[in-house]
Amino acid sequence: MADKYIHGHSAAVLAAHSRRTAQRDAAYLIPHIKPHFDILDIGCGPGTISADLATLVPQGRVTCVEITESALNAARSTFTSRSLGNGDFVVGDVTSRLPFEDDSFDVVHLHMVIMHLPCDATVALKEVRRVLKPGGVVGCKEMIMSTTRWFQVDKRLDMWEKAITGTILETGGSPDMGMGLKSAALEAGFEQQKVQSTASSWCFSDEEAVQFFGDSCAERFREGSQLREKTIGGGHATPEEVDDFVKACHEWKEKKGSWFGVMNGELLAWK
């Protein structure tokens, strides 16, 4: 599973993920968290959301899970830099069996994880349900990749959706998983009346955000990057198309009025 995450864990990817906060990216979940809760954060990445959640549970703990020990190092560093002592760091795989007993957590959180998994989403959500305490809630946010939009319009930028969609499908994932979360939760055994499905969006429109996103997208497709190799190797774009995309990103970020947006699906489901 370690090589299934198409973006890898490069500095550019970690920098992008480090901008994520619980207050923005898990706002749909926060009202359901109490100070004594134990939270499991699957696919925690650099741990910025995890650390924010840890501040909300001073009497509880946040357990951060990643697929490899090395991937957990960034999360450890985040907790250390914020002087947070209520974090645990565990290697685990939600597509098989997590190293936790049944009914262990009050909350399980997943952010942009299920869409990358090489299995049916129901498999992961069944495992999530197993480790939830009775009455516990899972909060999950996943992208709807087909809703990606760029402005200013530039056909060279279309490679982003084409490459991400193609590489996710190639590894067995679901690029539009955000639309299927409710259905997957019901199939995993959550009851209809205990499932809520909503949507939100990511938008990069102010000058700083546009500059960052343009640079980040270009950097992910630089020479030697994992995503570039997967895109070209999988036949999702030619080297020339990738180079054109990188150039277009740098031009896009300098244009007045540039804007990027994409919809995300959100799930709350109680056991």
Image: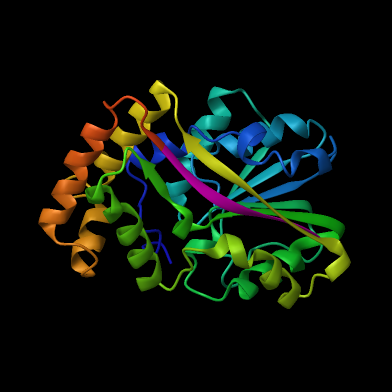
Q: Residue at x 71, y 29 (%)?
A: 55
Question: Where in the figure is residue 7, as x and y percent of width and height?
Answer: 35, 52
Which of the 4 image quarters holds residue 270? bottom right
Asked if residue 250 is positioned above or below residue 63 in the image, the reply reads above
Residue 143 visible, this angle: yes
Which of the 4 image quarters holds residue 233? bottom left
Asked if residue 168 is positioned above or below residue 268 in the image, the reply reads below
Q: Residue at x 69, y 72 (%)?
A: 183
Question: Where in the figure is residue 248, as x and y percent of width and height?
Answer: 21, 40
Question: Where in the figure is residue 16, as x and y percent of width and height?
Answer: 42, 37
Q: Considering depth in this image, is 176 or 171 the residue closer to the camera? A: 176
Q: Which residues are magenta?
A: 260-270
Q: Is residue 127 magenta?
A: no
Asked if residue 263 is positioned above or below residue 123 in the image, the reply reads above
Question: Where in the figure is residue 70, as x and y percent of width and height?
Answer: 41, 48
Q: Residue at x 84, y 34 (%)?
A: 35
